[in-house]
Amino acid sequence: MGVVELSKVTLILPRSELPEATKTLCQFEWFHPTGPEAKTIDTQVDALTSRTFKVFIDLDELSRNLGLKVEPGVMDVLSKGVKTEKEKFTATDWMSLVTKLEAEAKPLIEDLGTRMQAISKMKKNLSDLDALEAALSLVSSFNVDLKSLEKLKRLYTVFTIISTKDLKEVRNSLPEAAIIDKSLTRDRNAVLVIALRQDADRVDRALRSFEVKPFEIPHDLPQSPSEAYDAVKSRLEDTRKKLQQLEQETDDLSSKNAGRILTLRETGQVAYTVLSQVRKPGELKRFAVVEGYIPNVQQEDFHKRFSRWISVFEEAGHKEHGEHGEATPSVPTLARHSKMVKPFANITLTQGPPGYGEFDPTAIIALIFPVFYGLMFGDLGHGLVLTAFGAYLFMRAKGGHPIRSWGQMFIAAGVAAMVVGIGIGEVFGLELGKFIPLPFHPLELVERGHEAIPSIALQVLYVFLKIAIALGTLHIFIGLLVNVVNGIKSRETLEVYLHRVPLLILYVFFVSFLFAFWAGGKQISTLFTSTNSLFLLRDIGIHIPVKLASSIAIPGMIALLLLMVAGRVVLTKKGMGHGDEGAGMAALIEFVELAFERIPGFLANTVSYLRIAVLLTVHASLLIALNLAWSMGLAAIPLIVVGNLGIIALEALIVFIQDLRLHLYEWFTKFYEGTGIIYRKIIPSTNYVELEWEEKP
């Protein structure tokens, strides 16, 4: 579990056998290709790549035009529980695969593609006819043959439609012309302008100034507006019937072949993805060089499969740079987790995948994230609803759909909320002990909130505040400890001893100082005199006097600050600084960063975990307000049900956001970079197709 160790492998083979080697790589699967920096393209593979790309593009466009969903949508999964069965696509080699793909895709592309083009053309024609019908409907009352008007030798006529508000201005602009108008609508008028032939240019300029164009009836229609209107209506009716019939036939054909289209589309996409990764196999003329990464445990299997060619293995990991090693940026990260942990990789990936050699925090997140969620959302009833919702998502989403992972996360969070709900004796904001006997006395935050003595509720809240601070301190400590582990794994020996370990101890001393300050009555003067036990530690039976803790923590912090400043100078002189600054400037920057950013940041980060207790209190307060409705008797049941559902929906989202914030901003910033490259097998994961290679006869 965690980041898998990899080996870099270089495969050398004759160029003529590159397609066969690519086929074997697909059968092997666990190969992350990187490819050498090369400009030379293998013509054989490039030709296959171009052919598969063309088929994929044509099928992808056809899928979009037909409205086919490449992947089931969220609502489809929730409502139908969509499960796709993979179809096997068999071939003996890449050439036969591409040829078979083209042969099976061509009839679908031509038939459905032609139909879609016809539908598109018919829709455009229908749109033009609709516009023409609308225009003719305005002027159909004019029983005038427009063609005959154009034949007049001495007179120039223009038939058009003008806005009513512009009609007066048009008359003023053409005083010498005869203008006959008829109101068609409240704001549109049909107008016939009659002028002498020599005034034609003047009439056209005047009409253009009002953005008015002569109304023209297409030549294939009668030139009488009323007759043209009747003809267009008849054409519209015929076109709509033909379009409806064509669309119905296309829909039936699309439904019948939808699965096949998506299968062939994905086959083309997979083939193009694989072939494009090996189309530049180095600069050697007669030999191809394919580079990539495989898991260490599969070296022997790889060697057996590729024994006919030359395989060179080397360790993937670190580049040496004096005493300072750093992970190779190009090495991908293959993370493997158990089924219980894997869903929480979604949270890790929000910050990017871990780099190769970097600690993968997913397992820790899988434990802590539900705990934080349960503490902020603690209620047996609400946790049960959340668990049921998560189970619904898990069961509806089949295979590797992302919703399935979210369902598992909600189940874990709901179970944690149920455990906390039992601990505080709460079910839907009511006292759990009234319904079932409990072998212990719960805290009963909600019920105590109803009591007349506010000090009791405050005591319960104070308990949760201490729990939040304790968890926050532990969480940050783990983050700083992981930071040390990352430094050790990347072989940054000096960085570990001069910065990372001192930073971890500095946080321990700083927290000790805070606990001593609080236990000493929040007075500086009592830090070296008070015999009170440290805050939080006394609750678990550990008695450390304030004066002892202060005597160790304060000098310790000063010593660590000096050590880290001096350490930065040493690292800078060895070329391991953050920039090109000199030793003196590096020391100043380190001091300012520690004094004005790191230490105040420790305080802000630790205090931020108080939101755990605050959100639980908000959750309880909402339930207190809602349960007041029980005074209405049975009539309150609908309000109670709707209110609980509303609180669950609202609080579930808010708590998730705050839980995520604690991890991303308060925890990840202590150790995580997330600049890795996700390990991708040479053949991508699929939804509809499974490539199967047959042996050549």
Image (cartoon, rainbow, N blue to C red):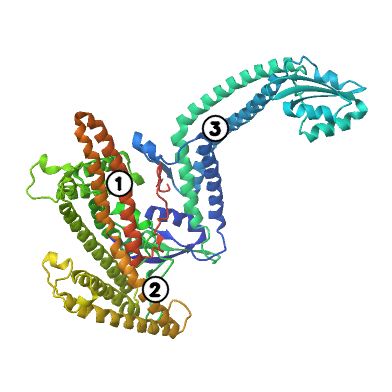
Place of residue 99 in the rendered image (x, y in percent of width and height, measured from the top left): 52, 44
Residue at x 33%, y 41% (from the top left corner): 397
Q: Is any part of residue 671 visible from this angle?
A: no
In the displayed structure, 465 sits above or below 619; it is: below
**Closer to us: mark 1 or mark 3?**
1
Label 3 sits on a secondary structure element that is helix
User: Which residue is denoted by mark 1 in the rendering?
Assistant: 652
Q: Label 3: few (<14), some or many (≥20) within 10 Å?
A: some
Per the rendering, the mark at residue 326 is 2
Three-letter code, disc 2: Glu
Give the distance between the C-alpha atoms of the residues marked 2 and 1, in whole angstroms: 41 Å
Give the distance between the C-alpha atoms of the residues marked 2 and 3, in whole angstroms: 55 Å
With 600 as the anchor, is 424 left or right in this view?
A: left
Between residue 423 and residue 693, name the one nearer to us: 423
In the displayed structure, 424 sits above or below 293; it is: above
User: Which residue is denoted by mark 3 in the rendering?
Assistant: 112
Residue at x 57%, y 63% (from the top left corner): 39
Considering every residue shown, the one lying at the far front of the view is 452
